[in-house]
Amino acid sequence: MNGKADPRAEGEVTTRTRLERGRGALGPALELVHTGRAPTRAVLTAELGVTRATAGAVAAELEALGLIRIDAKPSAAAGSQGRPSHRLSVAEEGPVVLAAQVHADGFRAALVGLGGQTVATAPGCETIDADPAQVIGSVVDAGARLLRETGRRCVGAGLAVPSAVAEPEGTALNPLHLAWPAGAQVREIFTERVRAAGIEGPAFAGNDVNLAALAEHRHGAGRGARDLLCVATGHRGVGGALVLDGRLHTGSSGLALEVGHLTVNPEGRPCHCGSRGCLDVETDPLAFLTEAGRAPGPEGLLVQARTLLRDAYADPAVRSAAEALIDRLGLGLAGLVNILNPDRIILGGLHRALLEADPERLRAVVADRSLWGRSGSVPILACTLDHNSLVGAAELAWQPVLDDPLRALG
């Protein structure tokens, strides 16, 4: 042997290395496009820390998989110089996932594409059976009909429920407002119904507020936050969620941040947990209606509470009720700020409406009652996505594709 390297062998190694590096970047690249953080190939190159050629190859492979679209001839902005970078976007006609949500006043099914875009939605149901299998079966059937009508390829399914979901069992520990038995096997039931309906891909289930936080962090008011706190009240009760360093924090067994049972009014209403004056019963829609002297109507508690707050805020009884709930919510948020030190708070459901009704009052209570208020102020924003728990359920189903597009798509 003359000790000289074979240039063909070196070329093969280099090509193989670039290919492996590029394939390893498929998931991160897809997530960047999915969350809107890489609108162009130039940004994708910088975010991935790879060469322009590697970024181009990665984008081309994602396009070949039907996941993204590359616009090779984008128009240049007025006054700009040089050739504009290729624009990247999710493929509008690409695969979808089935997203399902169950809450106290009904259920909803939708097909959601990459980018958090809702492709189709089934009419919501307003009656919830006490049998979780019956309800979950009905919402899956609604999603299956959407898939047949649209002819879209489905790569997974996600379910949002108003209960803490224990891991790894996937059981709903406290579906108090659904009249379901504690410990209902929601993930197992959902998986069985998805398989029986002939829907492809893995199936997941999670707490609705956790999933709302995930959706808002990727596509809404929480985008760009490092440590994001989400607190929301939907149709009944109050939930919380935390995104740490860009990832949903669920604790050792999926039960982290059950904020609904923080005491904010020691002499207040009895709570389902056995205590009194918890956020869960002091700041939800039923609490607001009760405080305002209104009886629950047939249209659903959340809808009724929002409408009352929007249309009758000038009524002294309604305004007084809103201020009482804002003060209790602010007290709870201040305690969470002291413990968690988030860089952003987002509020959903009726809490969003309370923030919009009197933002200065809520922010003042949090600043006055928290250490953060001594050094500045934590931004408190309204959630911006419609049906964010539904979008978050879709995010659960999209995650395997974001992790490894080649494996997930076969």
Image (cartoon, rainbow, N blue to C red):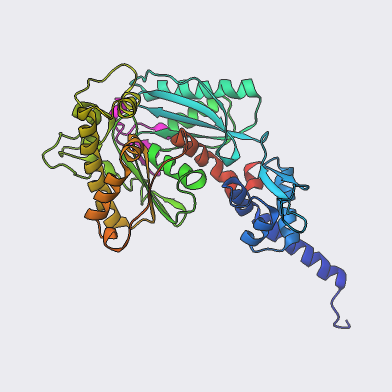
Give percent across and percent down for residue 215.
Answer: 48, 42
Between 99 and 380, the one nearer to me in the picture: 380
Q: Is residue 193 above or below residue 172?
A: above
Q: Residue furthest top?
A: 298
Overall secondary structure of the magenta section: loop
Quadrant location of residue 94?
A: top right
Query: Does residue 141 appear to the left or right of 382 in the view shown?
Result: right
Q: Is residue 192 above or below residue 253?
A: above
Give percent across and percent down for residue 17.
Answer: 73, 64
Query: Does residue 135 appear to the left or right of 301 in the view shown?
Result: right
Please indicate, yes or no, whether residue 384 appears anywhere in the rendered image.
Answer: yes
Q: Residue furthest bottom?
A: 2
Query: Does residue 402 appear to the left or right of 94 in the view shown?
Result: left
Q: Quadrant of the C terminus?
A: top right
User: Magenta segment, which residues?
Assistant: 163-187
Q: Quadrant of the N terminus?
A: bottom right
Between 95 and 353, the one nearer to me in the picture: 353
Quadrant location of residue 294?
A: top left
Q: Is residue 195 above or below residue 366?
A: above
**Is residue 91 one of those drawn in magenta?**
no
Q: Is residue 267 above or below residue 35?
A: above
Give percent across and percent down for residue 38.
Answer: 62, 52
Q: Report the residue at 45% width, 54% height from top.
A: 225
Q: Report the residue at 32% width, 56% height from top.
A: 340
Between 353 and 284, the one nearer to me in the picture: 353
**Is residue 169 one of those drawn in magenta?**
yes
Give percent across and percent down for residue 327.
Answer: 22, 43
Between 312 and 408, the one nearer to me in the picture: 312
Q: Report the residue at 50% width, 26% height from top.
A: 109
